[in-house]
Image: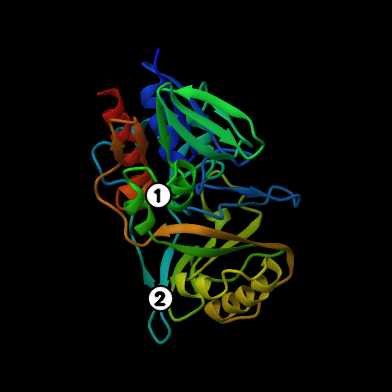
Amino acid sequence: MPTVAIIGAGISGIVCARRLTSRFDVRLFDKSRGVSGRMATRRTGHADACFDHGAQYFTVRSKQVKPMLEEWIDDGIVAMWRGNVSVLRPGFKIQREPTPRYVAMPGMNSLGKHLVRFLDVETNTHIEKAIHSGEGWTLTTTDGVNHGPFDVLVSTAPPEQTLGIVGSKSPFTSTLASQQFDPCWATMIHFEQPVPVSYDAAFVHENPLRWICRNNSKPGRDPDQECWVLHASPDWSKEHLEESPEQVTPQLLEAFSKAIEQPLGAISHVASHRWRYSAPVNPLEEGHLWDPKSKLGIAGDWCSGARVEGAILSGLSLAKKIAG
């Protein structure tokens, strides 16, 4: 059975692996402790407090993903989030946004955990280099451990990281080098009492923040744990990119207070996380990249118009190309 190595166990890599596993011997590698990539959830020692500090939700419009969504809903892993999502603009009345939004339960990373069952996954494995030879692809970790050779290599890591792994001889060097990502600082807050606002989440304008969300308004979360996630705007995140979480946190707490136009209540836990590769600025529309000569495939949300659905579509399209 032909062998496939997939670098990155985010949603693109997982979906690609699942489509290939019946005809290929597939192994997933991820440098993190868990799977799901930016569909991330963090839990604290404070009761059942949890925070979706990466992707906040996803929408589904394509006919390819709708059957998958229905299956995930039937499995009890995904549900529609019916929270009140608003738009906050200074000087304007709060606007409601009716867009159907879906979340994984009990955290956004639950979808990846569900889909990765029965797959061969090696976490805490940081692939540093991938070398192609007549025997296939050999992967080397930062610890100097070799894996392979594999007949096919797929990378779903961010373009800059993929370029570092496969090297400048890749036929996709210029494409990878041209891709840009916006960063995002995320702050997670556990309040002792509910925040008295009429909405559960909001897109924020004219503020260092771009998004605020009462995480416990999502299905599958403990409604008694007042957990909020703040996402800074791309411009603000760029300006403060190299600051420490300790420097960023008080600034975003102040911005949150201004956005909701009231002082913040007592906080039992707060932390911030930097997403260096949060959202693609100039995403492709091809769906994936594929070199039939070296059998190198590249996928990710940036290959298919961004967002979670784009990541899924990218993984599906690359798997179809590999399987022929």
Instruction: From the top left corner, tell me how far across and down residue 63 is, in percent.
Output: 23, 38
Instruction: From the top left corner, tell me how far across and down residue 208 is, in percent.
Output: 51, 77
Residue that mark 1 sits on: 58
Question: What residue is drawn where x is 52% and y is 54%?
Answer: 54
Q: In the picture, residue 247 is in which quadrant? A: bottom right
The answer to whether residue 60 is left or right of residue 145 is left
Q: In the picture, residue 25 is in which quadrant? A: top left
Q: Is residue 21 above or below residue 160?
A: above
Q: Residues within 10 Å of mark 1 (few under 14, many from 20)?
A: some
State the SS at label 1.
loop
Examine the rendering and report whether any part of residue 107 can be seen: yes
In contact (CB < 8 Å): disc 1 and disc 2: no
Q: In this orientation, which residue lies closer to the viewer: 37 or 211? A: 37
How many marks the image carries: the answer is 2
Residue that mark 2 sits on: 94
Q: Earlier in the sequence, mark 1 or mark 2?
A: 1
Q: In this orientation, which residue lies closer to the viewer: 225 or 49? A: 49
What amino acid type should be assigned to the residue bearing mark 1? Phe
Question: What residue is drawn where x is 44% and y is 44%?
Answer: 167
State the SS at label 2.
loop
Instruction: From the top left corner, tell me how far across and down residue 237 is, in percent.
Output: 52, 70
Could you tell me which quadrant the C terminus lies in?
top left
Determine the CA span between mark 1 and mark 2: 23 Å
Q: In this orientation, which residue lies closer to the viewer: 176 or 305? A: 176
